[in-house]
Image (spheres, helix red, strand yellow):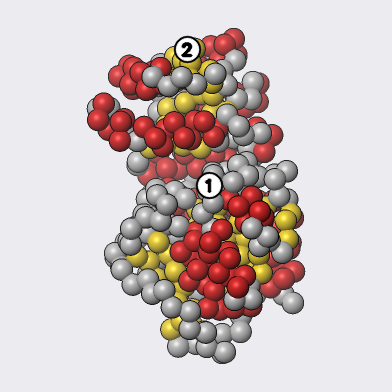
Amino acid sequence: MIKIFIADDSALMRTLLSDLFSKEADFQVIGTASNGREAVEKIKVLKPDLVTMDINMPIMDGIDALEIIMKECPTSVIMISSLTKAGADATIKALSLGAVDFIQKVSGTICRVDMIKREILDKCRAAVKVNLKKTTFIESFPKLEYPKKSFTSFNSFQKDFKVASKKMDEKIIAIGTSTGGPRALQQVITKLPEDLPCGVVVVQHMPPGFTKSLAERLNSLSKVTVKEAEHNDVISPGKIFIAPGNYHMTVESQGDKRVIHLNQDPPLASHRPAVDILFSSLAKFRDRVVAAILTGMGSDGAKGMKCIKEHGGFAIAEDESTAVVYGMPKAVVELGLADRVIPIDAIADELVQIVKK
């Protein structure tokens, strides 16, 4: 039985979530709170297995409450976030402080909660299995300014494997991740040197808006340049491109350049962006590809990694000892695709060593 605590300033949301969990045989709602201070006090006493924490609450917000909880009584926490720029910023901060995952806050109607019922239940069931020592990563969180960007919907993904131009001798790094990914990406990308001799493309499962906040945060902490990818961006050394939420990302040949293409083809196994689509698009670059699969639920990336390996690429999987959720890396390892299986704190050095050969 999963003992769950709900912290939300909306009485309606507390009721809707309580009703949702109460209908499941493996959940028991053991308490609720309408503000962060009340949540902290009750959680210390009730010791739930899992907390759903609203970000915006009176008296003490969800971020401050989360920080206290992770320091004084570490508990698996899933943040409930609004889809706003401020909400996205706060969510990325919460993930760096130790929150396991997040769910976009619904408008408050029963039908909307029902629409994401499966997502809520799946994420909550996965969250209680997490080793909390792997999620805590507390540090200062800078205030960031966000430039306005726009990108157009494209539907140009071509499933061909023509060998890329021989002029493109630079290697390319690809990274795929999901649950626990923001923390893992921070541990990898912030260690990459300014003179990194190749570009990096990243798929992190996240909704629109959140990927921009993640990219801006990583850019503020890194020696390399990190940005949310836009259609026709040219991949170049020392540049990191994160796929925008709700867009698949592929890498295509354009003369002697490698360029990013975005499209809104149907989600793959409920994911858009999908790691499999990015990885598969890279296979045509053969032995110039170095791909890493990090923490995450499910198996997205395994099929794409198989394609990369079949065309001569190099595969790295995060070791179970550091993965917040050992799902995506496990799928790659069990298929025998990984050339290296290493902990998250060693992956950046391994990537640099390989691409500088």
Identify the residue at image location x=60%, y=32%: 129
- Is any part of residue 43 visible from this angle? yes
Identify the residue at image location x=54%, y=74%: 283
Position of 280 with respect to 262 (left or right) is: right
Identify the residue at image location x=35%, y=42%: 84
Classify 10 Å Cα crowding around label 1: few (below 14), some (14-19), many (20 and above).
some
Question: Pointer 1 and pointer 2: residues touching (CB < 8 Å)?
Answer: no
Which residue is tagged 2?
31
Which residue is tagged 1?
298
Which of the 4 image quadrants contains residue 302? Answer: bottom right
Report the label total.
2
Position of 107 with respect to 136 (left or right) is: left
Which quarter of the rendering shows the C terminus? bottom right
Badge nearest the viewer, 1 or 2:
1
Residue 285 placement (x, y as % from top left)? 56, 78
Residue 168 placement (x, y as % from top left)? 56, 85
Q: Secondary structure at mark 1?
A: loop
Q: Secondary structure at mark 2?
A: strand
User: In the displayed structure, would residue 289 be above or below residue 276?
Assistant: below
Q: Which label sits on residue 74? A: none
Q: How far, Cα to Cα, is label 1 from label 2?
A: 30 Å
Question: Of the residues under marks 1 and 2, which one precedes in the sequence?
Answer: 2
Outermost residue, front direction?
335
User: In the displayed structure, would residue 255 be above or below residue 290?
Assistant: below
Residue 294 placement (x, y as % from top left)? 61, 52
Q: Nearer the viewer, residue 231 or 291?
A: 291
Identify the residue at image location x=40%, y=61%: 248
Amino acid type of the residue tagged 2 in the rendering: Gly
Which of the 4 image quadrants contains residue 332? Answer: bottom right
